[in-house]
Image (tube, rainbow, N blue to C red):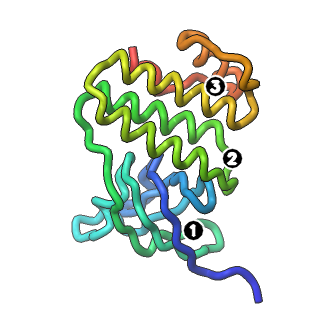
Amino acid sequence: MGYPRMYAVEGIIIKRRNVGEADRVLTVFTKEKGKIAAIAKGVRKITSRRAGHIEVFSHVRLMIHKGKTWDIVTEAASLGRFEKESLSHVSAGYYLCELIDKMTPLEEENRYLFDLLLYSLAAVFEETSEEKRVNIIHVFALELLWTLGFLPRSKELSFTLINPFIEKIIERKIRSVRLLS
């Protein structure tokens, strides 16, 4: 019988990039399928009704059509959005999304990490204290390393040692960390 051509997912937009004149490729961390990449055709046109729902930090429900090269976003509904309060809030959000993007493989479901990302983004965007935001980020990074098996639960790294440790794993610099300083 084969696989269905359409599927629905609940996800968080963690990255986007423009393609062509009107399209955008989205990286979405979903509850059902883990990290996926999909194209939103025509979303950069002024008349697009989906554009507001598929911004970075948006919690969304997507209908996706299985394509040959790219999966195609056909519908998008907002379940919530983490509002950009300040540069500090935004940079913390980008850091969490970058860690998820760089450290998780495509299409590997992990509902625990989805819930952790959703909770951590909410906490980071609601928190007014810079010190508490840094603590949320630290706990998130440790939990990510523990959950993915890069660090035993019995071991804990200080905040200053986490980034070099993660950079060794992903074999590149973390880009969003410059904004956190």
Horizontal and vertical percent position of residue 124: 37, 32
Q: Residue at horizontal 31%, vertical 25%?
A: 88
Q: In which quarter of the view is residue 148 placed?
A: top right
Query: Tag 2 or tag 3, which sits nearer the N-term?
Result: 2
Can you see residue 67?
yes
Q: Which residue is mark 2?
A: 105
Query: Tag 2 or tag 1, which sits nearer the N-term?
Result: 1
The amino acid marked with disc number 2 is Pro
Separation of marks 3 and 2 at Cα, in angstroms: 16 Å
Horizontal and vertical percent position of residue 100: 57, 39
Q: Residue furthest bottom?
A: 1
- Give the mark toward the camera: 1 or 2: 2
Query: Tag 3 or tag 1, which sits nearer the N-term?
Result: 1
Q: In the picture provided, is 105 more to the left or to the right than 119?
A: right
The amino acid marked with disc number 1 is Asp
Q: Residue at horizontal 66%, vertical 55%?
A: 109
Q: Residue at horizontal 60%, vertical 47%?
A: 112
Asked if labels 3 and 1 touch by Cβ distance under 8 angstroms, the answer is no
In the image, residue 96 above or below residue 142: below
Q: Residue at horizontal 69%, vertical 54%?
A: 108
Circle 3 Cα neighbour tier, 10 Å, few/some/many (<14 / 14–19 / ≥20): few
The amino acid marked with disc number 3 is Arg
Q: Depth check: 113 or 181 in front?
A: 113
Q: Which residue is mark 1?
A: 71
Q: Depth check: 122 or 56 in front?
A: 122
Asked if labels 2 and 1 touch by Cβ distance under 8 angstroms, the answer is no
Circle 1 Cα neighbour tier, 10 Å, few/some/many (<14 / 14–19 / ≥20): some
Horizontal and vertical percent position of residue 34: 62, 54
Position of the N terminus, as image quadrant, is: bottom right
For residue 172, which numbered disc appears in the image? 3
